[in-house]
Amino acid sequence: MLTISHRGYSSEATENTLEAFDHADRLGADGIETDIRVTTDGRLVLFHDRRLVDGRAVCDLGYAELCKTVGFSVPTLEEALDRLQHTFWVLELKDPNATKKYICALTEFVSSRRLLVISFWHNVIAEVQRQLDVDCGVTVAHRPVDFRISSFTEGHTIVWRYEYTDKELIHESSANGHRNFVYNLQGIDEHRNCFELGVDGIITDKPLLAAACKKELPAENDSP
């Protein structure tokens, strides 16, 4: 099971910063998850919230203004992928209006980086997969009744919210050809449960909990 450090390692540095990514890498996480938005001057930035604390939308700000307002240098997609070229990057696309910019930027990296591109915007993922040869996944926060009537493309990674997962779900999803990741898990008991469920990866704020759970189990060979 892969351990993906959520927005870097925010216990040691501000989330979605180069420092947080460096900490996650030094901890030995299998990969790093981060969020991509676009500024009004076309910079692809790694930033989770769509609005700042003053209410302004990230997409309405220029890059310099965004950095000045939040008080730190917000990393760009290019900076992060150039800094940690060896890691497995899980890139969540946040803004459906920036799909063309996402595709254009990712084109440069699909052949030289290990990437998984995900989004709650499943139509965005469909377009990315149509245009790029890159692993894609859909993020979901519900439990489907029947995969046969779902919009999930065979072979996609599905990133499930932990609360809606159980053995039946993971078994059915795997049987339909999907790779299964889980996010929003908390506590060592939930990390242990993910091992028991047999998911392929977890996206966690607590990679050290995952490491502790992994030590309790027989050695296994993980690969993204």
Image: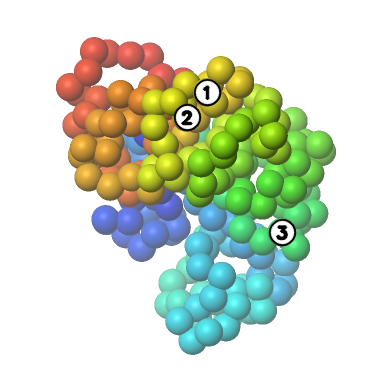
**Proximity of marks 3 and 2: CB atoms separated by less than 8 Å:** no
> Horizontal placement of 16 versus 192: left or right?
right
Marks 1 and 3 in Cβ contact (< 8 Å): no
Q: Nearer the viewer, residue 102 or 119?
A: 119
Q: Which residue is mark 1?
A: 172
Q: Position of residue 58 (x, y in %)?
A: 60, 74
Q: Which residue is painted at 45% across and 81% down in the image?
A: 53
Q: Secondary structure at mark 2?
A: helix
Residue drawn at x 45%, y 77% as measured from the top left: 70
Judge whether 126 appears above or below 70 on screen.
Answer: above
Residue 118, located in which quarter of the rendered image? Answer: top right
Q: Residue at x 60, y 78 (%)?
A: 57
- Residue that extends furthest to the bottom in the rendered view of this protein: 54
* 17 vs 166: above or below: below
The first of marks 3 and 2 along the sequence is 3
Q: Nearer the viewer, residue 37 or 55?
A: 55
Check the image and name the residue furthest to the front: 145
Amino acid at dot 1: Glu
Q: Position of residue 23 (x, y in %)?
A: 32, 47
Residue hosting label 3: 96
> Mark 1–mark 2 contact, CB under 8 Å?
yes
* The quarter of the displayed image where residue 82 is located: top right
Tell me which residue sits at (75%, 63%) in the image: 97
Q: Residues within 10 Å of mark 2 (few under 14, many from 20)?
A: some
Nearest the viewer among 156 and 78 is 156
- According to the picture, the residue beneath numbered tag 2 turns out to be 169
Element on which disc 3 rests:
helix
* Closer to viewer: mark 3 or mark 2: 2
